[in-house]
Amino acid sequence: MMLHSAYACFLALLGNAITLTPIHAAIEIAQYGGCLNSTRLLENPGPGDEPAFHCHFDSEACADGEEWLNPGQVSEQNHGPCTCDDTFSTNVYGFGCYDMEGSHTVKCTSTDDQCPTGWYHLGSRFNNKEVVSDDCGDGTVAFGGQDQTQMCGKRCTCHYHYASGDNSMSSWTTQYGVCYNMDSHQSYCAVSMSACDADETYFGSLSSQTEEIDCSCDKTETGACMNGETFSHCSVASDGCLAGQNFHTRNALADSAMDIQCRLCQGEEPDETSSPTKSPTKSPTRSPSTPMKEQVEPDLVVDDTTPVESESGAFQQNQNGIIAIISTLSLLTASLTFIE
């Protein structure tokens, strides 16, 4: 009993050992590319048709027969714009996961491998045929979807999480995962596993380890495209760079002499943006869930009456204090294992 009480106390300390550290480096916002189907473009698709161009984080989202356009090409060919701001219609697409047996809610991630085991994969372009209403944005009541003519909020995007029912749209609601170094206990918000270094582990936005970490787009870091050693622009991946440029990962950028941090989107208070380094609250007990194969089920009807649970975050932790707490928690966990 005493051991369990002590464990509970340390869990409480873990939640309280948090500070907010202002970032003094210049904050730059990522630029985005997309996938183009040239054949469909010639067909001049209209409202209700599959669009010829979709904004994405990187070329991994492109389907067969599509070509990837970097941010420069998107602009030159008059596609997009591709953004992660509060304009819903131009937002980069995220990936949708649907809980068919439990909560019957849609949860948004950035990649398909972050969907929990057994959840249905809605894909990275869910509700892409509907025309987005002109006033769709922060504070707008969500409506439509499911092949209706117009819609607002019924899509997973970089900035906005899918809005269930007739809930109002809210900015900075999409959450991202964390790259975590088990040895140094350093962590940062990242779009996907591909952003992590080899000695880091990625915990997706729907994993239990990131439940109390706020990784909204304004706190999620990216790499950068460089002209030699000169900064060009922020990018999620190397294919967001222009011809002749080289890519610096988030860590390479942080270790460089450049006083720049790259983020997915702008925060509410541009001069007070802070970087969350709170470590995952639980040591991993299993590998990230293996994604099921994406299903094709045209008749799927998403239950859109159950509100998506709020994915509230936490402030940034005091790194030194948290390391001590995690070490103690590890010892307590081992002891509890013997008792059970």
Image (cartoon, rainbow, N blue to C red):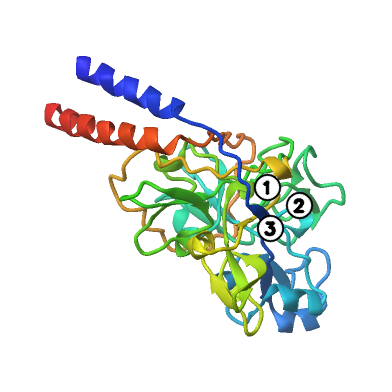
Q: Does residue 158 lie above or below 69 as drawn?
A: above
User: Which mark, residue 160?
Assistant: 1
Q: CA distance from mark 1 to mark 2?
A: 7 Å
Q: Identify the residue under disc 2.
A: 88
Tell me whether circle 1 and circle 2 mark residues in contact (CB < 8 Å). Answer: yes
Q: Residue at x 42, y 38 (%)?
A: 319
Quadrant that contains the N terminus: top left
Q: Identify the residue under disc 3.
A: 29
Q: Earlier in the sequence, mark 3 or mark 1?
A: 3
Q: Residue at x 80, y 79 (%)?
A: 76
Q: Is residue 282 visible to us here?
A: yes
Quadrant that contains the C terminus: top left
Total residue callouts: 3
Q: Residues within 10 Å of mark 2 (few under 14, many from 20)?
A: many
Q: Amino acid at mark 1?
A: Tyr
Viewer-proximal residue among 70 and 130:
70
Q: Earlier in the sequence, mark 1 or mark 2?
A: 2
Q: Amino acid at mark 2?
A: Phe
Could you tell whether 194 is left or right of 165 in the image?
A: left
Q: Does residue 297 lie above or below 64 as drawn?
A: above
3 or 1: mark nearer the eye:
3
Q: CA distance from mark 3 to mark 2?
A: 17 Å
Q: CA distance from mark 3 to mark 1?
A: 16 Å
Residue at the top extreme, as displayed = 1
Viewer-proximal residue among 102 and 237:
237
Tell me whether circle 3 and circle 1 mark residues in contact (CB < 8 Å). Answer: no
Q: Residue at x 28, y 23 (%)?
A: 7
- Tell me which corner region of the image, top left, top right, bottom left or bottom right, holds residue 15: top left
